[in-house]
């Protein structure tokens, strides 16, 4: 698994539950190191091992942690650059949803080695009903997507309901009900970025 | 070809940076994005050439020039700030008397979005500007991570090199390792013999046959030195063609003499390289720890060095064991203080 994914997980645990929890998780998982390098590639097993170790230590299901990770990616100040890249998807939450098909390709342009699952958005004709299909590795990414979608809706100021359509809790298919595209003001975003571009 | 009818509103959506010019060069209407650049002065009704300068092709100053430029790509500057550069393309309009001019930012988009607070909606849906900005930001973030990683790896590399004990060319120990072992032996009061080995005629090999031949000779020498020593001894390359051998618990001069002679004999066997023979020899100087009442690493090294230079002076390809006679003018009293009376 790409270092960017591993490091996101690391920062999420560190920032949310503290450095000690992360150290414990890294040790229990037998990582042999404490810090993931963003530009390295790691064995997938390491990622799942450290996730499960964190789940044990915190007594929270892995799927809950993954969903919280998705929210963290958008809402934590440390991940601002990622939020900005997602906001390039469009001017409103609906435009953002429609840009998700391109996400895999966009990510590949920036970091060719970073493998993300294929996202397909269905629907949109009737009153605000969408379905997002999330297929392929990494395992559990659907959960991350659900957390991320919820946070992005807040970011745009949209009011949405999200529902897992699968029966295995993996969020391979998420139903998105858009109640209001512009419900609140949302967070500011300017193309130019905060300083210097 | 049939004329096409399109409303101003639709034109603005399709080409938000377009202008329509009258035959006299007055701006009749403009797209919403280009008008953001001229929010203070406005554009409609003003002469085009007061608002924009066409830099390429050269000398375009009238609507007729614009039309004559045909398919040429136009390079323009917005005169409101005299810095925003634009790319443009002009086609005849209204029966060939006026001009429809469409523009885009090109590379100046990075500064323009900041200067004019442009949003995603200001760009035509087909415009790749937003993709370019996305890529720029994503690549910058990735590059920043890579730079941080490189800095860390560089630090780790320097640290690893500082801690290295091996000479990468020959696989022998390096000077650091030699210093380490020598000071450990001295501190522990171990007995040992120390040889300084300096290759003779090595420079000639390097100069006449090249550095590849020199490297080949050094690895060959390393193999011989390792062959002639035991596993508990240390063989280190401490300079270009300088080696130090430390023989653990061996201070017997006769044995050391034998070893040195054997090394010199073996080194003098021509070393073939690419069809040529490399001819070298070695001068050796030896000092032994039990020669001293209180041995010190520096002293033993420098005495072995004196012995080595005695070998060189005697015509090279020699072995000399250090004795106090080799020391330059020193009083007997000083010497007695440093050495056991022999």
Image (tube, rainbow, N blue to C red):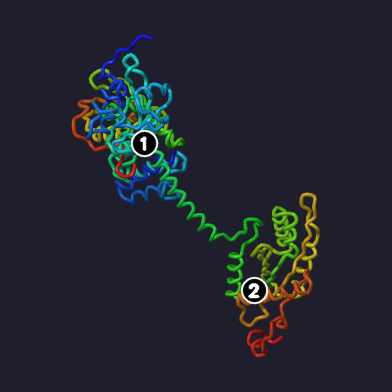
- Most foreground residue, B160 or B3: B3
Percent x, y for residue B157? 51, 54
The answer to whether residue B279 of the structure is visible from this angle is: yes
Q: Is residue A130 above or below residue A157?
A: above
Give the residue number, with chain letter if any, for mark 1. Answer: B108
Q: Which mark is residue A11?
A: none
Q: Residues within 10 Å of mark 1 (few under 14, many from 20)?
A: some
> Does residue A162 show up?
no
Quadrant assignment, res B205: bottom right
Image coordinates for residue A170, horizontal then vertical, percent: 34, 30
Q: Nearer the viewer, residue A93 or B95?
A: B95
Pointer 2 and pointer 1 on the same chain: yes
Q: Which numbered disc covers residue B301? A: 2
Mark count? 2
B337 sits left or right of B285 in the view: left
Quadrant placement of the N terminus of chain B:
top left
| Left or right, A38 with reference to B224 | left
The answer to whether B119 appears left or right of B340 in the picture is left
Label 2: few (<14), some (14–19) or many (≥20) C-alpha neighbours in 10 Å? many
The CA distance from mark 2 to mark 1 is: 67 Å
| Chain for disc number 1 | B
Residue A125 lies, with reference to residue B128, above or below; the image says above
Q: Looking at this rendering, what residue extends furthest in the bottom direction?
A: B333
Task: Specify the quadrant that holds the C terminus of chain B.
Answer: bottom right
């Amino acid at each position: 698994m790409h270092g960017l994914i591993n490091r996101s997980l690391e920062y999420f645990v560190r920032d949310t539950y503290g450095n000690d929890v992360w150290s414990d998780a890294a040790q229990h998982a037998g990582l042999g190191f404490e810090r993931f390098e963003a530009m390295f590639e790691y064995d997938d097993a390491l990622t799942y091992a450290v996730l499960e170790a964190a789940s044990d230590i915190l007594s929270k299901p892995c799927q809950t942690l993954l969903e919280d990770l998705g929210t963290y990616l958008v809402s934590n100040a440390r991940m601002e650059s990622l939020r900005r890249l997602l906001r390039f998807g469009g001017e409103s939450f609906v435009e953002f949803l429609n840009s998700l098909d391109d996400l895999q390709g966009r990510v590949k342009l920036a970091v060719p080695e970073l493998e993300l699952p294929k996202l397909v958005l269905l629907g949109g004709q009737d009153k605000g009903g969408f379905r997002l299909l999330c297929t392929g590795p990494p395992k559990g990414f659907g959960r991350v997507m659900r957390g991320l979608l919820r946070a992005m809706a807040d970011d745009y100021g949209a009011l949405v309901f999200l529902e897992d359509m699968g029966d295995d809790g993996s969020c391979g298919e998420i139903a998105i009900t858009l109640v209001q595209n512009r419900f609140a003001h949302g967070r500011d975003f300017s193309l130019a970025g905060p300083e210097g571009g | 070809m049939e004329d096409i009818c399109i409303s101003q509103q639709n034109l603005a959506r399709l080409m938000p940076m377009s202008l329509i010019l009258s035959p006299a060069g007055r701006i009749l209407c403009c797209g919403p994005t280009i008008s953001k650049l001229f929010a203070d002065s406005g554009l409609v009704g003003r002469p085009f050439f007061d608002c924009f300068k066409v830099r390429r092709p050269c000398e375009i100053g009238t609507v007729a020039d614009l039309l004559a430029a045909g398919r040429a790509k136009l390079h323009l500057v917005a005169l409101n700030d005299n810095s925003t550069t634009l790319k443009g393309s002009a086609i005849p309009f209204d029966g060939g008397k006026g001009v429809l001019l469409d523009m885009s930012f090109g590379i100046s988009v990075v500064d323009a979005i900041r200067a004019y607070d442009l949003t995603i909606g200001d760009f035509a849906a087909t415009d790749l500007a937003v993709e370019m900005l996305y890529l720029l930001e994503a690549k910058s973030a990735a590059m920043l991570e890579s730079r941080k990683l490189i800095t860390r790896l560089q630090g780790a590399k320097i640290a690893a090199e500082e801690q290295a004990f091996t000479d990468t060319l020959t696989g022998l120990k390096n000077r650091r390792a030699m210093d380490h072992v020598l000071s450990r032996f001295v501190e522990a009061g171990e007995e040992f013999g120390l040889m300084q080995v300096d290759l003779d005629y090595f420079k000639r090999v390097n100069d006449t046959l090249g550095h590849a031949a020199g490297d080949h000779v050094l690895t060959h020498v390393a193999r011989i030195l390792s062959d002639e020593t035991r596993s508990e001894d240390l063989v280190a390359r401490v300079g270009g063609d300088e080696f130090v051998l430390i023989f653990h618990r061996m201070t017997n001069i006769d044995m050391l003499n034998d070893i040195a002679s054997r090394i010199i004999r073996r080194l003098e066997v021509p070393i073939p390289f690419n069809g040529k023979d490399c001819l070298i020899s070695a001068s050796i100087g030896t000092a032994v720890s039990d020669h001293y009442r209180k041995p010190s690493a520096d002293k033993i090294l420098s005495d072995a060095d004196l012995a080595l230079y005695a070998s060189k002076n005697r015509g090279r390809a020699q072995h000399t064991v250090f004795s106090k006679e080799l020391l330059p003018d020193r009083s007997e009293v000083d010497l007695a203080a440093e050495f056991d009376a022999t």
